[in-house]
Amino acid sequence: MTADVMTRVAPLGLRFWDEVNRDLVRDGLAVSAWPESLPSRPRSASVNASGVWALHDLALMAAFERGAGDARYWEAVASGADPALSSRRPFVVEVRDTARRFLPVRLRVTLPVRGLYDWPAAVGLAAEARALSAGAPPGVIPLPVAPSRPVRALAVVRAELAVDGDEPAASALVEVFASGRLVGRGMSDERGRVAVIFPYPDTLVVSSGSPLGSPSAGASPSEWRWNIEVVVRYAPPVAGARRGDAPELAAVFAQPPTTALLRLSPEEPLRDFELRHRDEQVLRTEGASDGRLWIRTVI
């Protein structure tokens, strides 16, 4: 007697990356997806022991989920030879963190996806933009850190961003560099608040005027200094975007560099600054009465 075997295909599998702990995010997330044409039909993802968040029972995907998932199945999806599998569909994926470690974001994905979704490759991120995920599994999706996240034994650069000194610069991407290498990045929340949290760099340490060296060069931690550069990327919100919606992560990374101001009069751009060990660096524009960091929009 031969037993019937039933297979089920998950149209989408995702892995999320914590750039502070440098590890997969295995818990605490609320991941949901829905067809772009049917926002009222969301489905929630489940996570397995390997940190893969899988989505099942999605609207409009029943025929795909009933497939065998073998090579012939994916050939039919790619070629459109099987009418039931010929129409791939655009979906919105929303990620929210119930533990408040990360800010909410959205992804736009065409389903089904064979294997794990490779977000950096799918949105065409340059190699340098993926630098913080070095050593991580391929294809992981970096989640932006919430400004309120607790910090222990790590470097922190904070700011409250304002566009031309007026509106909060929400969903701006802030990148921190040491010796030309990307060491940390963060995204601002709806009030323009951002925290970039990262391990202290191994190089560019200045101790009491001594030559550049490493933290183990003999100076006490209170004398350690790092020369740091910040790049702020920002574009005004898309016309018609609904306030309160999570930003699309690909659009956040695609924002152009803008000018952050060190001071207002005379106007001077922020270039680099000195980071001290165990001192949180808060970036502000000199002459701005509200204590925020002003940025100029790109025209």
Image: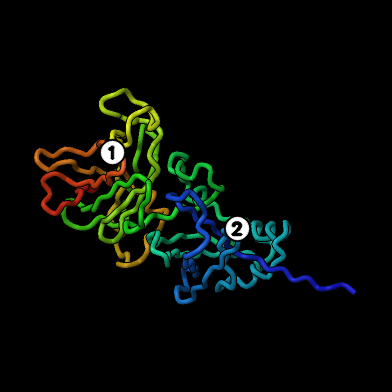
Residue 92 visible from this viewpoint = no
The residue at 35%/35% (across/down) is 178
What secondary structure is marked by label 1?
strand
What secondary structure is marked by label 2?
loop
Q: Residue furthest top?
A: 211
**43 sits to left or right of 3:** left
Q: Quadrant of residue 192?
A: bottom left
Q: Which residue is mark 2?
A: 50
**247 sits to left or right of 15:** left
Q: Which residue is mark 1?
A: 275
Image spot of residue 46 (x, y percent):
56, 68
Depth check, front residue: 204 or 240: 204
Q: Residues within 10 Å of mark 1 (few under 14, many from 20)?
A: many
**Kind of residue indicated by mark 2:** Ser
Residue 157 visible from this viewpoint = yes
Q: Is residue 192 above or below residue 258?
A: below
The residue at 28%/38% (across/down) is 275
Image spot of residue 93 (x, y percent):
47, 64
The image's colouring method is rainbow
Viewer-side label of 1, 2: 1
Q: Residue furthest bottom?
A: 40
Depth check, front residue: 140 or 206: 206
**Kind of residue indicated by mark 1:** Leu
Q: Quadrant of residue 146?
A: bottom left
**113 sits to left or right of 98:** right
Quarter of the picture containing the N terminus is bottom right
Distance from disc 1 to disc 2, alpha carbons, whole Å, reads 37 Å
Q: Earlier in the sequence, mark 1 or mark 2?
A: 2
Image spot of residue 176 (x, y percent):
34, 41
The residue at 23%/48% (across/down) is 297
Depth check, front residue: 194 or 294: 194
